[in-house]
């Protein structure tokens, strides 16, 4: 066969086939990926319909389908039912938000780091544990599922945040992102589709790309899921899972309404959809609504990490898994070979059984309240979402600023923030906004110094000076 020779064929992408003896689908998938990364195809661009491209290249439709599928699994493109296939809005941004080196010449407001006040108390607590005679056994090989006492401690404690589960349904993971990865590996397959907010946790995005799971932006208005047509949407998009941070959503800070929770639970049960509930911010959120777990306990896996309210360095998270999923997720955790240190698990267990935990939570809440007051003071004339106990805030930028440009200029000024593009799912352009982690700076004085720099940048835009 020869390629059709109609040069004026109006198409957004016209690839060429250099070697018809080699696998054509890998050639063209690589070419599509290269053209996207080179900026020839830009975020939001619509790709040619599959039949049209197959006709143009004299290829079978299944070959084009395979090409698009490969690039979709890499997160480069996204298909929208009834609309077509588009270049993903976040292809030019990184999903990795942790800084890669210790020495930085800027103030960190990007990565969500908890207030580190209280670490000295944790150290002193650990010193006391070291003197106890039974602690030596936790330096030996132990069950990756933890001890019954450890699981019982958590199943009792999480009653405080509205999660009701037996010790048998508690699994241990090395942090919240590890728990998300284990769930995705254990319960989903490449090509499966998970619905989430149009702006979502960057760690979920990197996991989805690695595994080949597709993230689908759910219909949303003003930061809340449009639940009236949720069931129909899930059917048309063939969703197998949901991912939500119901309290102080990352990055927009919104907390899910009661009506959303009820509807999501009902749809999940009716369509047998798996819910991944990331409850990382529930302890500080002073939530008034029950968790999603309450509305669909047999469909929901609830992740409960200690990183924000206790100590991130201990690297312990708990995963509440219903019986139907527990075996697969437990096997996934074991296969990943990232077993929680028995020593860390026991230290955390003893802190949960001591007055220290409530002390740490109270002190960290007070620190967050003080820092958010400072942020509110500096950005009183801007739209700044987030509550008094939220670790981060969502700053809406003036129209003259592009989000990525603001992130770049802020870093040049000595402050790291993260733009909305880093959290975007699907083809829709993200809002002009940046996430500011008020808890990340080492002190309130350092936070104030960073906010002064950001305020100057915003003032430049407000004065109609081109950024």
Image (tube, rainbow, N blue to C red):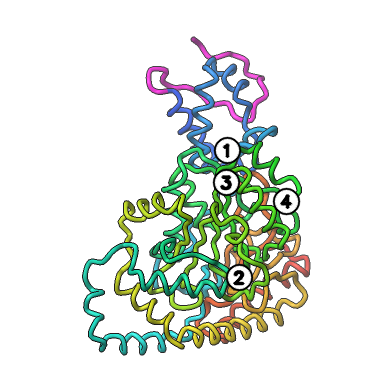
Q: Nearer the viewer, mark 1 or mark 4?
A: 4
Q: Which mark is residue 227?
A: 4
Look at mark 2 in the image and give the residue it sits on: 436
- Would you call the spot at circle 4 few (<14 residues within 10 Å), some (14-19), or many (20 or more)? some
Q: CA distance from mark 3 to mark 1?
A: 37 Å
Q: Is 9 inside the magenta-drawn segment?
A: yes
Q: Which quadrant holds the C terminus?
A: bottom right
Q: Secondary structure at mark 3?
A: loop
- Mark 2 and mark 4: Cα distance apart in space: 29 Å
Q: Which mark is residue 40?
A: 1
**In the rendered structure, are the residues bearing label 1 and label 4 in contact, judged by CB atoms less than 8 Å apart?**
no
| Closer to us: 385 or 101 | 385
Q: Residue 272, percent across and down? A: 57, 44
Q: Is residue 115 above or below residue 101?
A: below
Whether 51 is drawn above or below 363: the answer is above
Residue at mark 3 to residue at mark 2: CA–CA distance: 33 Å
Question: Residue at 66% across / 19% down in the picture?
Answer: 8
Which residue was labeled with disc 3? 273
Between the residue at mark 1 and the residue at mark 4, the CA separation in whole angstroms equals 37 Å
Q: Which residues are magenta?
A: 1-23
Q: Quadrant of residue 351?
A: bottom left
* CB atoms of marks 3 and 1 within 8 Å: no
Task: State which tag comes first along the sequence, 3 or 1.
Answer: 1
């Amino acid at each position: 066969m020869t390629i059709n020779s109609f040069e004026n064929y109006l198409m957004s992408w016209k690839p060429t086939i250099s070697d018809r003896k080699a696998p054509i689908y890998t050639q063209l998938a690589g070419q599509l990926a290269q053209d996207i990364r080179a900026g020839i195809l830009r975020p939001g661009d619509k790709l040619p319909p599959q039949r049209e491209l197959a006709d143009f290249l004299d290829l079978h439709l299944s070959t084009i389908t395979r090409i698009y599928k490969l690039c979709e699994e890499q997160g480069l493109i996204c298909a929208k039912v009834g609309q077509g296939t588009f270049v993903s809005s976040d292809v030019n941004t990184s999903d990795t938000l942790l800084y890669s080196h210790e020495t930085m010449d800027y103030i960190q407001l990007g990565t969500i780091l908890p207030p580190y006040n209280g670490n000295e108390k944790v150290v002193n607590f650990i010193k006391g544990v070291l003197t106890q005679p039974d602690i030596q056994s936790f330096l030996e090989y132990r069950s990756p599922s933890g001890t019954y006492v450890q699981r019982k401690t958590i199943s009792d404690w999480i009653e405080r945040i509205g999660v009701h589960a037996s010790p048998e349904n508690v699994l241990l993971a090395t942090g919240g992102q590890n728990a998300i990865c284990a769930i995705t590996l254990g319960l989903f397959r490449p090509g499966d589709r998970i619905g989430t907010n149009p702006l979502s946790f960057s760690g979920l995005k990197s996991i989805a790309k690695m595994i080949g799971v597709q993230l689908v932006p759910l219909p949303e208005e003003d930061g809340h899921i449009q639940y009236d047509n949720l069931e129909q949407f899930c059917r048309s998009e063939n969703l197998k899972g949901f991912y939500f941070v119901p309290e102080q959503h990352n990055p927009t800070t919104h907390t899910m309404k009661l009506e959303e929770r009820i509807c999501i639970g009902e749809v999940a049960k009716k369509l047998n959809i798996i819910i991944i509930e990331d409850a990382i911010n529930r302890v500080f959120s002073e939530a008034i609504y029950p968790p999603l777990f309450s509305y669909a306990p047999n469909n929901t896996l609830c992740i409960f990490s200690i990183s924000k309210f206790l100590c991130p360095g201990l690297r312990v998270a708990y995963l509440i898994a219903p019986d139907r999923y527990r075996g697969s997720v437990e096997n996934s955790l074991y296969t990943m070979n990232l077993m929680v240190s028995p020593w860390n698990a026991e230290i955390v267990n003893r802190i949960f059984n001591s007055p220290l935990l409530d002390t740490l939570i109270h002190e960290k809440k007070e620190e967050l309240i003080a820092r958010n007051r400072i942020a509110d003071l500096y950005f009183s004339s801007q739209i700044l979402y987030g509550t008094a106990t939220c670790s981060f805030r969502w700053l809406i930028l003036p129209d003259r600023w592009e989000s990525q440009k603001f992130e770049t200029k802020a870093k040049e000024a000595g402050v790291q923030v993260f733009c909305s593009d880093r959290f975007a799912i699907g083809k829709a352009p993200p809002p002009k906004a940046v996430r500011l982690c008020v808890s990340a700076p080492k002190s309130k004085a350092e936070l104030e110094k960073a906010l002064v720099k950001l305020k100057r940048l915003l003032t430049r835009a407000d004065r109609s000076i081109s950024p």
